[in-house]
């Protein structure tokens, strides 16, 4: 079971770009264990991609994505074989592209390191 879950939620993604939504301060060292994404609508033009960053550096080995038309739920296991430790004092942010997505929730599950 996760020791901490970070959640980002957007009704509309109206711009491409970095650091959308909340930025989270880490109160201790954590290891990411799972990412879950739900979108009611993925843009028709391209897949929805998201990148969770620890002090500006991605946590993923590959960028997780929801393909257009596949807007339900994914359990992204795109971490490197040895997941990075998110250090105490780090700031965790989310990048989302492209714009036009609706009803997005991203959950990052963490275990205390």
Image (cartoon, grey):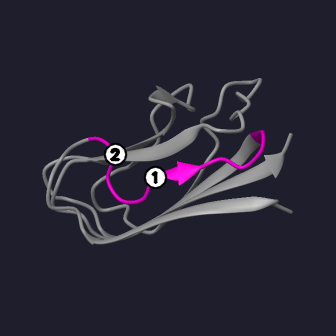
The magenta region covers: 18-30
Mark drawn on residue 23: 1
Q: Identify the disc placed on residue 91.
A: none
Name the residue rendered at 74%, 51% in the picture: 110
Residue 13, quarter of picture: bottom left
Residue 83 vs residue 46: left or right?
A: right
Q: Is residue 58 above or below residue 88?
A: above
For the residue pair 61 and 20, the one nearer the viewer reads as 20
Q: Return the x and y of residue 27 as percentages of the image width and height.
A: 72, 49
Asked whether 42 or 113 is in front, the reply is 113
What residue appears at the point 14 percent right and 61 percent down from the top-left corner?
A: 14
Q: Residues within 10 Å of mark 1 (few under 14, many from 20)?
A: some
Identify the secondary structure beneath mark 1. loop
Q: Residue at x 45, y 45 (%)?
A: 93
To which residue does mark 2 refer? 19
Identify whether 103 is placed above or below 27. below
Q: Does 27 lie within the magenta span?
A: yes
- For the C terminus, the quadrant is top right
Residue at 42% from the left image edge and 47% from the top image edge? 94
Q: Are marks 1 and 2 in contact (CB under 8 Å)?
A: yes
Q: Residues within 10 Å of mark 2 (few under 14, many from 20)?
A: some
Reply above or below: 65 against 37: above
In the drawing, does residue 19 fall left or right of residue 23?
Answer: left
Distance from Cα at disc 1 to Cα at disc 2: 7 Å
Of residues 104 and 3, the one nearer the viewer is 3
Image-based side of 8 in relation to 32, left or right: left
x and y, in percent, of residue 44 in the image: 15, 58
From the viewer's side, name the closer residue of 17 and 71: 17
Q: Position of residue 19 (x, y in %)?
A: 34, 45
Main secondary structure of the magenta stretch:
loop
């Amino acid at each position: 079971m996760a020791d901490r879950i970070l959640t980002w939620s957007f009704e509309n993604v109206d711009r491409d770009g970095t650091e959308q939504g909340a930025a989270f301060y880490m109160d201790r060292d954590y290891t990411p264990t799972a990412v879950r994404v739900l979108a009611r609508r993925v843009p028709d033009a391209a897949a929805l991609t998201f990148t969770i960053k620890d002090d500006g550096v991605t946590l993923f080995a590959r960028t997780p994505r929801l393909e257009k038309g596949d807007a339900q739920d994914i359990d992204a296991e795109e971490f490197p074989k040895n997941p990075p430790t998110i250090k105490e004092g780090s700031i965790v942010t989310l990048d989302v592209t492209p714009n036009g997505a609706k009803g997005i929730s991203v959950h990052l599950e963490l275990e205390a390191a």
